[in-house]
Amino acid sequence: MPVHNTVFDEKYTMEINIRKISVADVEQLSALARQTFFDTFKDTCTAEDMEMFLQQYYNTGQLSTELNNPLTYCFFAEVDDKPVAYLYFMEDYNSLPLMKKWKALELKRIYVLKEFHGKGIAQKLMDYFLEYATHNNYEVVWLSVWEHNLRAQKFYEKYGFVNTGYSHNFPIGNTPQTDIWIWKFLKQ
């Protein structure tokens, strides 16, 4: 179900459309996923490690497999019919088995093209995710975030996410990195 929101910028009014991504969109998703991940983490690892990671996780075959999973929910945020961000979530307890104590929904990815940062797009996607979780009676939502991505951490904190005290390795190729698990309990 498409969602239309209007964001007012100093220069113009921008309409944001949120729509479910289908396998037919996999080329656009791959390009967007590769670009946004690269822009976010390019200075945190070697160029070789980055390229290897992008090839492994954001190729069309891998993304098609994810989109074909009926438990996967993936959405574009579009401006002027162009995908500028995406959201990916699912009920998945494999990464942190502790979450099996609750009905939990994991936010796997939320990325926005850098030229659209600060325009309210990430907020619209997060609102969409939280509304979905609340509507479907999830008790907790959770995600992992790179320990040094303070911008993202501040964004999540505004939504009431807190550190779980758990972390995990999230290497980019041979470059070691650590993500922290954060969560938000929803009122029932």
Image: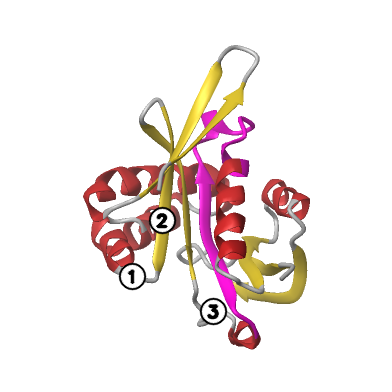
Q: What mark, if any, has residue 95 been given in the picture?
A: 3
Quarter of the image for residue 9 reads: top right
Q: What mark, if any, has residue 74 been given in the picture?
A: 2
Q: Secondary structure at mark 2?
A: strand
N-term-proximal mark, 1 vs 3: 1
Query: Which residue in the protein does label 1 denote?
Result: 70
Amino acid type, label 1: Pro
Q: Position of residue 127 (x, y in %)?
A: 61, 49
Q: CA distance from mark 2 to mark 3?
A: 19 Å
Left or right of residue 59, residue 11 in this image: right
Asked if the magenta segment contains residue 109, the reply would be yes
Q: Residue at x 60, y 50 (%)?
A: 126
N-term-proximal mark, 2 vs 3: 2
Q: Residue at x 39, y 43 (%)?
A: 32
Tell me, yes or no, whether the two marked residues, 1 and 3, touch with CB atoms within 8 Å. Answer: no
Outermost top residue: 11
For disc 3, the neighbor class at 10 Å (few under 14, some 14 to 19, many from 20) is few
Q: Can you say whether 93 is above or below 59 in the image? A: below
Numbered disc in front, either 1 or 3: 1
Amino acid type, label 3: Ser
Magenta-tinted stretch: 102-123
Quarter of the image for residue 124 reads: top right
